[in-house]
Amino acid sequence: MTKTTIRPGTSRARSSKRPADAFVVLSANIEHDGGWLDQHGTPDLARSLEIAHLLAELDPDVLLRQEMTHSQLGRGDAHRHQVADILDSEVFVSPNQWGSNPNGMLVRHGTFGTVQQRGEADRPYRAGPWGTPPTIVYATFQEAPEHTLILGSVHASSNSPSVRRLEVEHLSREIDKVPRGAGLLVGGDWNESPLQEGEEVPAIDWQAPELTDDVHRRHRAERGLDGTWRSITYMDQYLLDTGLHDPARHVARAGKPDALRATAGRARPDQGGPQRIDRFALDRYLITAVEDVEVINMSGASDHDAVCLVLSRRGMIESLRRSVAPAPRWPACGETHRTVTGTAR
């Protein structure tokens, strides 16, 4: 078994050592659930559990997971509950539409007053455009039981720009609840670059000679009238247009540019190299509770790094009560940046 470690300086303290008000949300795409198949087609579930222990060291209140391959409904029940025990959490997994790498979410016991997975009865996302339906959970804090926080774990299509457009538009069924009083926090692997303005990761040069994966280029870029290939950024644009915010941008603006580090692609120059495709999106009230964003190096565990979002729990509750001023809409493509309410601490 390959030994997996988090690089020094990136592991967060256990809950007994961290500030009492800190609320940690972790998003992690763990390649094939960490349990790669051996030559006989048998998954290495021991390695998958080792990675679960690794994630538990980061002490998340909510863990958004992508590629829960060996934890899926039905044949992955036993493994799923082992992972939940390691993380002291209730586990939710979405059904597969096609493929075998479902989304999931783990919520630490006692974090909320109520927790309920959306779609358990009517499966609204299974009927939508998603190849891998998101895991959507509705939660309430004990201190504010009348206010719903919508949590989502997302893994967008890796091979179809057209499907990704439909997926993010379909997600607006949850975004549309924000003006009616809900809070919204979604995160995951969007499989698409963000808008380039203000980013730390250079834009992919899709014309570069080392970029030899032509099929991947067609999955992630489009050719302009001048024949030049440019990254597709529709999902990021859409989320910004609907009033959501990327917390990494806020933290970077407050003085921590490492929040905008690449999360995938380091070992794939043939596909354009490093890119920031694992991101969060928060509503304009909840964004004011953000304190930090950190990219956690997961080398040896996955082809994606994890992203750790830290919020003020008290600030989250105040945002749900709408007792804080909302942040102004973040500038979309071509707009001039404005000062945003709420700072990283």
Image: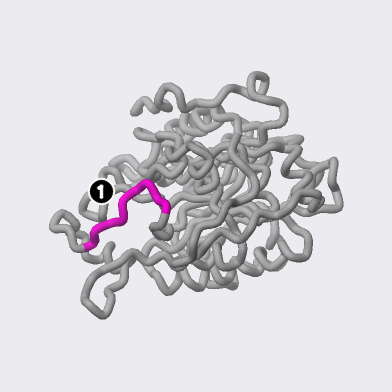
In-front residue for pair 95/296:
296
- Residue beneath disc 1: 268
- For the stretch drawn in magenta, the main secondary structure is loop
- Under circle 1, the secondary element is loop
Q: What segment is highlighted magenta in the picture?
A: 198-206
- The amino acid marked with disc number 1 is Arg
In-front residue for pair 118/343:
343
Determine if residue 95 is in view.
no
- The residue at 32%/40% (across/down) is 38
- The residue at 55%/30% (across/down) is 58
Residue furthest to the bottom: 225
Q: Position of residue 165 (x, y in %)?
A: 48, 71
Reply above or below: 229 against 192.
Answer: below
In-front residue for pair 147/205:
205
Task: Tell me if mark 1 has few (under 14), some (14-19) or many (20+) residues whose alpha carbon lies within 10 angstroms of its own.
Answer: some
Determine if residue 141 is in view.
yes
Q: Is residue 66 left or right of residue 269?
A: right
Q: Position of residue 307 (x, y in %)?
A: 49, 41
Q: Is residue 82 left or right of residue 182?
A: left
Q: Position of residue 197 (x, y in %)?
A: 41, 57
The question of residue 220 being in magenta is answered with no
